[in-house]
Image (spheres, coloured by chain):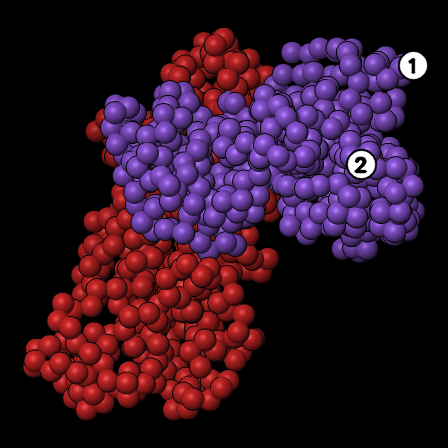
């Protein structure tokens, strides 16, 4: 199945002269499901536990997906369903209660438990929202129990984080009646990046600033009509919608990748707080100048290099924009699992006209295109990387882009280095 | 439902993938939701394969469930055939697709493809990876060998003067040292003057499997994976099969004798010519300190049973625990456990294994990557003997477990993590030394302080007192408690329990240093 669709919003709305098209193919999608987000979320929210209600495949996925076996005692587990659970849903609910009891006994330090739906739990229509409500009554107030779906039939990779954060939104307390406007930064960021942004917002006089998810579930930020929010990640559609339903206002911007993206993202907040251009430059100038200088040394290594993105995290378009505009790379094809026109409205017009955008995937045909293009570097998932390397292509594992601090000024050069390293390595090896 | 932190085996379709990936010219069309493609990375990352596994996934999503998922499967199967032109096609469903009951076998048959199509029924909510691999291999062998199946009642004619011929069954993709074990087994057979008709599934073709009936007997390397196919071949083609797995010095010799008998050749020349270094290394005086080391063993049945024999009879350890996640082979593990006077732990629950290790307080843990984690957290040395594995368990160097060289490898890799003999004595003698303490790692393994950094604060610690204290309220005098702390941590729990039992039996309310040594003398008889 193939279709070429004109890009309705995005570039057209920005008055881009050529009519870019999006390649949409249906076939095998070589992507993770939303459960994979647990790999970083369980580290981010330090008092939360993620219980997947699913099959052995789910458990196997999470332990294999990111080499998470480095964590001897993870804050996640799987309640593996067996035949008896399939035979009767009443029993499945009893079983779930028993498992949660055992878990709580083992980890009394946990304050927030997510029941995470999977493909099999959804196909048999096990109602985890109801189970969460039932169990909340039992364990309230020491333990809060929520649910979301990380299933592959509902979510692709980073959409799992979106679903998780969206499930937190109704739990956010209401704004204090006397409070002024506040800023909420939405999307899991490395702690170090969060701290940097907090300092910059302080310097700008923007605040109070809160982050979702918080590091501790007991520190949930308030949300309401005086909340302005910035998306730190491009994959948070449901969370953004839920916040808007609470009355919060999205501050649309580029995503904070690279110097340009970070500046535009900070500026969106600064504008909402009425910060003058001069005050803005005074507050961010030093960090911006520093990061431009740090990026400089990667221009030689990356400039002119052709890059091909397989769809993975939805970070592809902002990344391609950064690499094209700040490092003069040439994005050949930029694949994304979903193209969210509204949240990417600022990003899309900045991509070169020559870039092919593709949404969804038929992995075999995409591999054909990749081999035909022979790009200098391919961004792809772990299943494809070594096979592509073996054919002589240079690859960058996309999952590393989720596990590494890449947002903000101080990380712009680190982000460039992630792409430069595979090229440097290939040039260096003589075997 | 089962609460699972780590799973020892993947679902059964992962087993099918291990067969498809091991072979040449076989393609697997898997009806599975988006996300199940994670399985590719097991092969491309953990095993570092340079090719994608030969698997096409339908990767259906929620919107497909309302429509025609059967049609999606058919188009995926047809396109996979057109693109990859396999010699045989495996078709099946993963756990979620099993629930929507599209019948991949029937759908694929209806396509009328010009190659054998093997429908796989792998019940994902009952069975696991190794069973899935065994079933897939069996079905594939059956399908490929079908044209040459002899009539019922057929007997294998005497071989006459021809060289004996056998098949080697069992090595798969993503197997623990399968690649190197196969080399080792081939070498032994070659030295015995036995020809190999087919080694499968690793590197075998569909055409190879069609000739599988030509061999006189079968060598079964891993019963979990090849036992089912070997039993069918025995019934159908009158091919006897080996029962001995050649892991360990003695087991390798037993294996040579067994194979020689099946082949009708003389084992003695090979037994005299080739030896493992393990027996001499084990007898050399340096190894004295290995004597009676308490070892806990857990893994798949084949490797756990073999490890127990080596540990007890070839290295002089004491097996204090033996277990396996291979429920299908529970009986064999229980039989083996009797030899060491322990009760077999048959479970696929990581938490149970963890509790057992804590309870037994072994000095060495031989297990999977999971047990390596348990051991690491408890500060006990460990070595990996079985799947599930990590990328580091696929070493670049030749590193078999089977055969004479396998025994050498095992000696090195199990002894290496332990404290060397003299160092251990010094540790026991000078316990107050600020650099010699319970957390210190063997000096040849680098800085010991790094050993426990991964443990989380909430994790239970091995050296903590045993969870169930006797009901009697026995009090420890401060100096007795201090004396107890001078006993090495791995036996401290046992010493505490023994002392308290001794005290409670004698109605002693307060344990003093005297009580401690009275108990020591009492139990040392």
Tag shown at residue B316: none
Residue at 88% over, 37% down: A276
A131 in relation to B189, above or below:
above
Q: Residues within 10 Å of mark 1 (few under 14, many from 20)?
A: few
- Whichever of labels 2 and 1 marks the residue nearer the N terminus, that label is 1
**Badge nearest the viewer, 2 or 1:** 2
Residue at 47% over, 48% down: A47
Residue B449 in the figure: left or right of residue B164 = right
Color used for chain A?
purple
Of A351 and B131, nearer the camera is A351
Chain coloured red: B
List x then y, in percent, for residue A12: 84, 13
Of B372 and A229, nearer the camera is A229
Q: Is residue A388 visible?
A: no
Q: What is the quadrant of the N terminus of chain B in the image?
A: top left
Q: Which residue is mark 1?
A: A17
Q: Element type at marker 2?
A: helix
Of A95 and B150, nearer the camera is A95
A216 in relation to A331, above or below:
below
Tag shown at residue A270: 2
- Quarter of the view holding residue A280: top right
Which chain is indicated by disc 1?
A
């Amino acid at each position: 199945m193939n279709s070429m669709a004109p890009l309705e919003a995005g570039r057209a709305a920005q008055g881009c002269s050529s009519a870019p098209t999006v390649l949409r193919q249906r076939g095998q999608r070589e992507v993770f499901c939303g459960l994979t987000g647990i790999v970083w979320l369980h580290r981010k929210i330090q008092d939360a536990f993620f219980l997947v209600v699913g099959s052995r495949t789910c458990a196997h996925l999470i332990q294999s997906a990111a080499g998470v076996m480095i964590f001897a005692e993870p804050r996640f587990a799987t309640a593996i369903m067996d035949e008896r659970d399939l035979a009767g849903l009443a029993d499945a609910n009893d079983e779930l209660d028993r498992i949660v009891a055992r878990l709580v006994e083992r980890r009394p330090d946990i304050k927030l438990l997510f029941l995470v739906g999977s493909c099999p739990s959804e196909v048999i229509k096990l109602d985890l929202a109801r189970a969460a409500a039932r169990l909340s009554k039992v364990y309230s107030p020491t333990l809060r129990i929520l649910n979301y779906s990380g299933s592959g039939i509902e979510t692709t990779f980073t959409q799992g984080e979106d679903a998780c954060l969206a499930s937190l939104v109704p739990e956010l307390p209401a704004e204090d009646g006397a409070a002024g406007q506040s800023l909420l930064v939405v999307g899991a960021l490395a702690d170090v990046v969060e701290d940097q942004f907090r300092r910059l917002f302080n310097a700008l006089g923007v605040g109070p600033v809160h982050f979702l998810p918080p590091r501790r579930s007991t520190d949930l930020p308030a949300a309401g009509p005086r909340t302005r929010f910035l998306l730190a990640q491009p994959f948070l559609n449901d969370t953004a919608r839920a916040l808007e339903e609470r009355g919060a206002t999205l501050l649309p911007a580029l995503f904070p990748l690279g110097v340009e993206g970070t500046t535009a993202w900070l500026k969106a907040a600064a504008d909402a707080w009425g910060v003058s251009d001069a005050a803005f430059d005074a507050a961010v100038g030093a960090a911006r100048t520093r990061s431009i200088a740090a990026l400089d040394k990667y221009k030689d290594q990356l400039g002119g290099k052709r890059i091909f993105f397989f769809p993975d995290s939805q970070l592809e378009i902002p990344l391609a924009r950064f690499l094209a505009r700040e490092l003069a790379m040439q994005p050949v094809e930029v694949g994304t699992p979903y193209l969210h026109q509204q949240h990417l409205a600022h990003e899309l017009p900045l991509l070169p006209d020559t870039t092919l955008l593709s949404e969804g995937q038929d992995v075999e045909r995409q591999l054909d295109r990749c081999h035909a293009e022979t790009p200098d570097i391919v961004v792809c998932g772990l299943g494809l990387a070594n096979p592509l390397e073996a054919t002589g292509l240079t690859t960058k594992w996309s999952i590393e882009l989720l596990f590494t601090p890449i947002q903000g000024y101080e990380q712009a050069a680190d982000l460039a280095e992630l792409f430069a390293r595979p090229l440097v390595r290939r040039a260096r090896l003589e075997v | 439902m089962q609460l699972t932190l780590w799973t020892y085996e993947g679902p059964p379709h992962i087993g099918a993938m291990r067969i498809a990936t091991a072979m040449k010219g076989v393609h697997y069309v898997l009806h599975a939701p988006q996300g199940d493609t994670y399985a590719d990375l097991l092969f491309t990352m953990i095993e570092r394969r340079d090719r994608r596994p030969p698997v096409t996934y339908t990767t259906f999503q929620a919107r497909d469930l309302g429509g025609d998922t059967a049609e999606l499967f058919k188009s995926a199967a047809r396109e996979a055939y057109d693109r990859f032109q396999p010699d045989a096609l495996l078709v099946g469903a993963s756990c979620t697709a099993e629930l929507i009951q599209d019948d991949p076998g029937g759908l694929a048959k209806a396509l009328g493809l010009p190659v054998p199509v093997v429908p796989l029924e792998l019940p994902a909510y009952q069975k696991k990876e190794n069973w899935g691999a065994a079933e897939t291999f069996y079905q594939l062998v059956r399908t490929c060998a079908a044209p040459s199946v002899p009539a019922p009642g057929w007997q294998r004619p005497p071989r006459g003067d021809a060289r004996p011929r056998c098949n080697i069954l069992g090595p798969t993709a993503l197997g623990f040292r399968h690649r190197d074990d196969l080399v080792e087994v081939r070498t032994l057979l070659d030295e015995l003057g036995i020809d190999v008709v087919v080694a499968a599934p690793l590197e075998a073709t569909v055409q190879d499997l069609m000739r599988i009936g030509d061999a006189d007997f079968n060598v079964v390397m891993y019963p979990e994976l090849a036992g089912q196919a070997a039993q069918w071949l025995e019934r159908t083609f009158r091919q006897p099969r080996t029962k001995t797995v050649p892991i360990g010095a003695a087991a390798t010799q037993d294996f040579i004798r067994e194979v020689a008998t099946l082949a009708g050749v003389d084992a003695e020349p090979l037994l005299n010519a080739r030896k493992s270094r393990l027996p001499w290394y084990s007898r050399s005086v340096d190894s004295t300190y290995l004597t009676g080391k308490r070892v806990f063993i857990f893994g798949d049945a084949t490797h756990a049973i073999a490890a127990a024999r080596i540990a007890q009879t070839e290295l002089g350890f004491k097996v204090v625990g033996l277990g396996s996640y291979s429920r299908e082979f529970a009986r064999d593990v229980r039989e083996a456990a009797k030899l060491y006077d322990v009760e077999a732990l048959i479970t696929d629950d990581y938490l149970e294994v963890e509790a057992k290790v804590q309870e037994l307080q072994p000095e060495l843990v031989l297990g999977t990557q999971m047990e390596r984690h348990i051991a690491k957290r408890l500060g006990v040395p460990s070595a990996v003997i079985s799947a599930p594995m990590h990328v580091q368990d696929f070493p670049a160097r030749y590193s078999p477990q089977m055969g004479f060289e396998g025994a050498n490898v095992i000696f090195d890799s199990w002894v290496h993590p332990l404290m060397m003999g003299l160092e251990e004595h010094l540790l026991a003698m000078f316990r107050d030394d600020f650099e010699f303490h319970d957390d210190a790692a063997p000096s040849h393994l680098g800085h010991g302080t790094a050993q426990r950094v991964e443990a989380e604060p909430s994790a239970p610690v091995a050296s903590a007192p045993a969870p169930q204290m006797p009901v009697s309220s026995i009090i420890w005098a401060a100096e007795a408690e201090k004396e107890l702390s001078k006993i090495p941590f791995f036996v401290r729990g046992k010493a505490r329990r023994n002392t308290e039992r001794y005290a409670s039996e004698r109605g002693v309310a307060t344990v003093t240093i005297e009580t401690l040594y009275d108990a020591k003398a009492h139990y040392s008889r």
